[in-house]
Amino acid sequence: MEATVPELPEPSSAAVSATASSAPRSLAEALRARDDVSLGALLHARPDLLSPVPGDITQLATRAGTRASVVRALDRLDRFALQTAEALAVAPDPCPYPVLESLLAGEHGSGSGSHEDNGARAELPRALGTLREQALVWGDDERLRLVRTARELLAPAAGRPSPTGLGPTVAEATAGMSPTRIQEIVAAAGLPATHDPVSAVTALTGLFTDPERMSALLDEAPAEAHQVLGRLVWGPPYGEVTPNPTPPVRWLRDRGLLLPASARTVVLPREVALHLRGGLAHRVTEPLAPDVPAEREHRPQLVDANAAGQALAALATVEELVKSWEHAGPPVLRAGGLSVRDLKRTAAALDTTEPAAAFWIELAYAAGLLASDGEADERYAPTPAFDDWVDLPPAERWSALAAAWLPATRTAGLVGDQDSKGRTLSALGPELDRSAAPEVRRRVLELLAALPEGGSARPDALLARLAWERPVRGTSELRARLAQWTLTEAEVLGVTGRGALAGHGRALLEHRDPAPLLAPLFPEPVDHVLLQADLTAVAPGPLRRELGDVLAVLADVESKGGATVYRFTPGSVRRALDSGRTASDLHAFLAEHSTTPVPQPLAYLIDDVARRHGHLRVGAASSYVRCDDDGMLNEILADRRSTGLGLRRLAPTVLAAQAEPGALLDGLRAMGYAPAAESLTGDVVVTRADAHRTPARSAPVPVPDGPPVPDETLLGAAVRAIRAGDLAATAVRREPTDPAAPAAAPGELPRTSAAETLATVQAAALTGSAVWIGYVNADGAASQRVIAPVRIEGGFVTGYDHTADEVRTYALHRITGVAELAEEHL
């Protein structure tokens, strides 16, 4: 196979001189040459560089090259920008632009058509611009340099293969090899012997990078040797060999086409792999982001109506969830969170799956509607904010839920997974925050918003786009899961309908209030139900708040949908009587709100339960039961189901029990009775629906994904501060007149006595010249300043600070030293 391997051209001495004089010699010099807009773009793309604000350009360059910052920057590159950085990591250092271009797009007129026509050549300037903007690459097009830390992370090593699949160079692979063995390889490859190992390695490298000689050498190889090379060429480049390798492997090893990496491992040198690949660093380059086409297009009105229906159901589910925890919410685990058993119970109560129940629980928690009560026997319960939330119009209630969902970092989809220590992650537990979640949610909605109105996309197309935008392994896997959860959650919450972004979902994405768009889509609440003879009531739509609250106590929800079906049972009627209502109240309520006459079976049910309600009284002794009908007490004592309650007769109308009052009430109700709780004064205890609330709790704060992106005001101030510090750090100082006085080293603060400091500052004030000072503020932070003193009095010097571009006052005792500037910098 004939191909041209990228090779660093030999520039002329004049070109080298011109390039050396104009090109930056370090990352700091490259950053210093940027304008303020470009410097601000760097700080915007990598906000971690601003914590704290660097004192000057040198500090900025040093921080931009630290491992943690470089890893974070690489994690946020798109696939082609990352492939460009990976190619630079295996290219000569420095690397001319044509060599980088050939590594990514192939040579003009050679290589496969897929690499010629896939847009890599046209997209390379954009990718390289991204790397330059983020200070991962510096230098002009003749001498491109990848920052050292990024090269260390991306270049191949023995224990860490390169993402390109390339191995070490010939020079790296032969390091430590005996000179005799190197000469043997040179001789077997048909090269003349050399005087030293360095020249031998150079000659071998020259052979492997010469297309014509390399093709001639490979033409002599056995057919099986080409198969061996074919298995290693795209990586991994390492292979195991036996002490007595096969003839094809021996032929390759003798000529250096395979070099020993260990006693039982050989490696394919980078130069050989590049020749076999046609000079390409990657098997497949992906310069263009995958398209996200519209799979189906629905009428926008249909999408909005479908999403509104889901939104209404979401409101009902959240309200039902929170109200189910009003009286005896689930306990908080010792390590925090909800137990698996309580999650299952909640899912059964909501008639949904456990993952869906975890989502609704986390959503209510994120909106501040649920929290732990902080008591000794800690339980989850509604917060006072829930009472305010239920009083809002439905569209505003949905807006509050959606506004809590979009930026939340708590991720319900992780519930049931295991952490690094093998512990199961629980709903409301402490390990569910994923800082990437808000970004992924917003990005998924943005991709849907880019489609025509009413358009839905295939999930695999969305995932492919997200994987291209953040391709780093580990990061992309989490983002894919987050994207899948986002699609599911957005649909059940009503942000999307039939997979397409709804109008109110678009408003949410654009930071507009979605309530005005959603409100007209919600049906008007109704103030009536249809009572039926089978002890059910049908609500033909969402009920008014007052009607819904009473009916939720008086009946049990049997089915949901376009119309909600409620069923009246002895237990539900008893629950309404426990809340303080009388039978006449219930008859009047049903007659007022039913469009049909109250069925006779329902009226009989209410009267029958009311007649027996409160006939038994339970109070605290440990507990007791009293009843005027001693026959009923005899019946209870004779019932085998009462054995566990520990009942015994104290008087004809009183039974004592070993069980607590709450357990005694539940036991008697399970036996079919309708007892009422009794206070210490003998009055009936009325149970209200809003009996238990937590103290005021704020909603959980999302965990940020690193430092926040700075706004324009902060960016401008940071750029000015860095420029000012750099001006002070690079100002040329006049040589001290006293030969014995030590000169301040670069980066160090000047040191002078108090008397000399005062004299120099006074002289500068008289002549109107500027001086360079070192200053330590009240917090102990040291800085360098260039100031023009104007007034010295009371132990303070006032002058124009060139670094801050304003007039400032400094305490003389905090100035570490002073030095005059050179004549050309005055």
Image: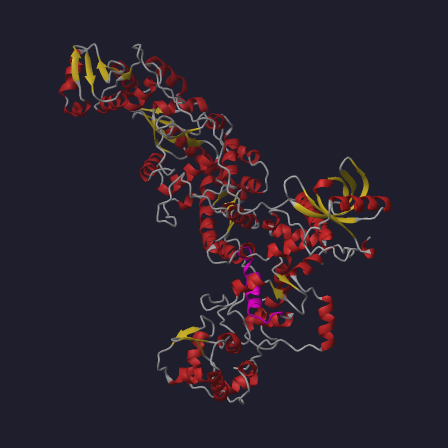
Seen from this angle, which residue lies furthest left? 638
Residue 679, quarter of the rendered image: top left
Magenta span of residues: 74-94
User: Could you say where residue 437 lies in the image, as x and y percent from the top left?
Assistant: 49, 46
User: Could you say where residue 671 lies in the image, as x and y percent from the top left?
Assistant: 21, 23
Q: In this view, does 180 lie to the left or right of 507?
A: left
Question: Residue 431 magenta-drawn?
Answer: no
Near-viewer residue (602 or 691)? 691
Identify which residue is drawn at 52% across, 62% down: 153
Above or below, comparing residue 443 to residue 629 in the picture: below
Overall secondary structure of the magenta section: helix
Above or below, comparing residue 445 to residue 266 in the picture: above
Can residue 80 be seen in the rendering of this structure? no
Question: Residue 83 magenta-drawn?
Answer: yes
Residue 285, quarter of the rendered image: bottom right
Near-viewer residue (503 or 189)? 189
Q: In this view, does 319 lie to the left or right of 673?
A: right
User: Could you say where residue 74 lies in the image, as x and y percent from the top left?
Assistant: 55, 58
Near-viewer residue (241 or 649)? 241
Identify which residue is drawn at 56% across, 85% down: 212
